[in-house]
Amino acid sequence: MKRILVTGGFGFIGTHLVEELLLNPINHVTVVDDLSTSPVDPDAFITGIGWTHSEYLSRLDAVITTVKKYFRQYTLPHFDEIYHLASVVGPVMLIERGGKILKNMVGDTYDILEYCLQHGTRLLDFSTGEVYGGLNSNGMCVEEGSMIVPPKASARLEYAVGKLACEIALKNTCNLTDLHATIVRPFNATGPRQQPGGGFVLPRFLNQAIAGEPLTVYWEGKGVRTFTHVKDIASGVVLMMERGHRGYAYNIGNPCNKCTVLELAHKVLEISGSKSEIIFVDPRTLWGPLFEECADKYPDVDRAIVDLNWHPYRTLDTIIADGLAYVQARRKD
Ligand SMILES: NC(=O)c1ccc[n+]([C@@H]2O[C@H](COP(=O)([O-])OP(=O)(O)OC[C@H]3O[C@@H](n4cnc5c(N)ncnc54)[C@H](O)[C@@H]3O)[C@@H](O)[C@H]2O)c1
């Protein structure tokens, strides 16, 4: 039996990762989540996953609390592996947490790092493609490239710098100790269970299309994104835990799905059959002057393909269709 901890395991990516991990019958998964931004009801998630209740429950347990309290106040079992996902995320969510993002992120990562050092636990830390910053010339992000910090303060930058600080602390600890940590930089994870509340674009478009409301494209919708199916991300990080080189960061994203936000809006209308119109808005009129969109970005994923033998194969059409099915099912509930 392999004991695995997933922090943020009831989140959007976390639930898909837990499902992926439980496909392997040797895995026992513990989730730690404070449910602050979870898209699921934990009980419904456990029973609704398609496993028989007892079979599932025997290999999944959950503690509803913060990472900080869990690592400081609980008596912890031995974990063989920890996937650390718990974090604030999303352009709208970040605005209201500005000034507190970095402290929580770094504090949680250090608590987990200490545990892993003491117990010989392998760690997979969730970073972000945002660490590449905002000034790359054409948006392409390569792991060997420079990290570029734009000359302005924002909640988005605090998030990116916090994630990068955690990455560097983990890499340095790997250099000086036996710690086995790998880092994933996901690019535009999306698909079923992602909520529009955080400011994520695909769930917003899908909900608007189904409701017959206008699709709100921010500014002119020229921003380049690389939408990646959440299930491709989940399978990638499981391979990364097994095969990733310690101290390495890996981009995980699907460059074949590169498109502008306006192109995404048109695809959503095409696939959903919605007659909604597309309107262009200044998001600062919706979310206030601190709202900031990310820079153009798309990943080079050669390192993940070569080291992990990972291949993202779900297309943009599949992502939209799966997201649409989820939103439609939720509206019927
Ligand atoms: N969604 C993306 O496109 C994307 C892109 C790059 C990186 N990431 C990273 O992936 C990870 C997961 O993101 P997600 O999209 O699934 O977000 P999410 O908000 O759906 O999931 C985060 C989960 O962690 C929980 N949580 C948050 N803070 C916590 C804390 N202090 N203690 C315990 N639980 C806590 C929330 O309740 C939630 O269930 C994050 O680390 C995020 O930075 C996501």
Image: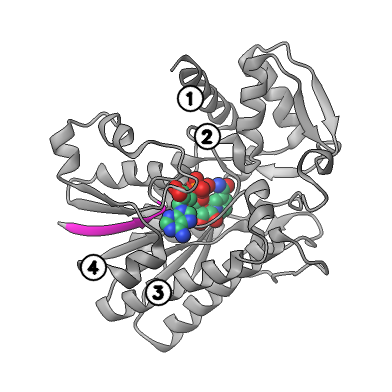
Q: Is residue 46 among the parts visible in the rendering?
A: yes
How far across and down, in percent of the image, does residue 280 sit? 85, 30
Q: Which residues are magenta?
A: 2-8
Q: CA distance from mark 1 to mark 4?
A: 35 Å
Q: Residues within 10 Å of mark 4 (few under 14, many from 20)?
A: few
Q: Main secondary structure of the magenta part?
A: strand
Q: Which residue has dot 4 on it?
A: 76
Q: Earlier in the sequence, mark 1 or mark 4?
A: 4
Q: Earlier in the sequence, mark 3 or mark 2?
A: 3
**Residue 49 is covered by the magenta coloring:** no
How far across and down, in percent of the image, does residue 243 sit? 36, 62
Q: CA distance from mark 3 to mark 4?
A: 13 Å
Q: Are marks 3 and 2 in contact (CB under 8 Å)?
A: no
Q: Quadrant of the N terminus?
A: bottom left
Q: Which mark is residue 326?
A: 1
Residue at image point 27% right, 76% down:
120
> Tag 3's secondary structure?
helix
- Amino acid carrying label 1: it is Tyr
> Tag 4's secondary structure?
loop
Q: Which residue has dot 3 on it?
A: 111
- Amino acid carrying label 3: it is Asp
Q: Quadrant of the C terminus?
A: top left
Q: Which residue has dot 2 on it?
A: 191
Q: Residues within 10 Å of mark 2 (few under 14, many from 20)?
A: many
Q: Earlier in the sequence, mark 1 or mark 3?
A: 3
Figure check: 184 above or below 278: below
Q: Earlier in the sequence, mark 3 or mark 4?
A: 4
Q: CA distance from mark 3 to mark 2?
A: 31 Å
Q: Is residue 86 among the parts visible in the rendering?
A: no
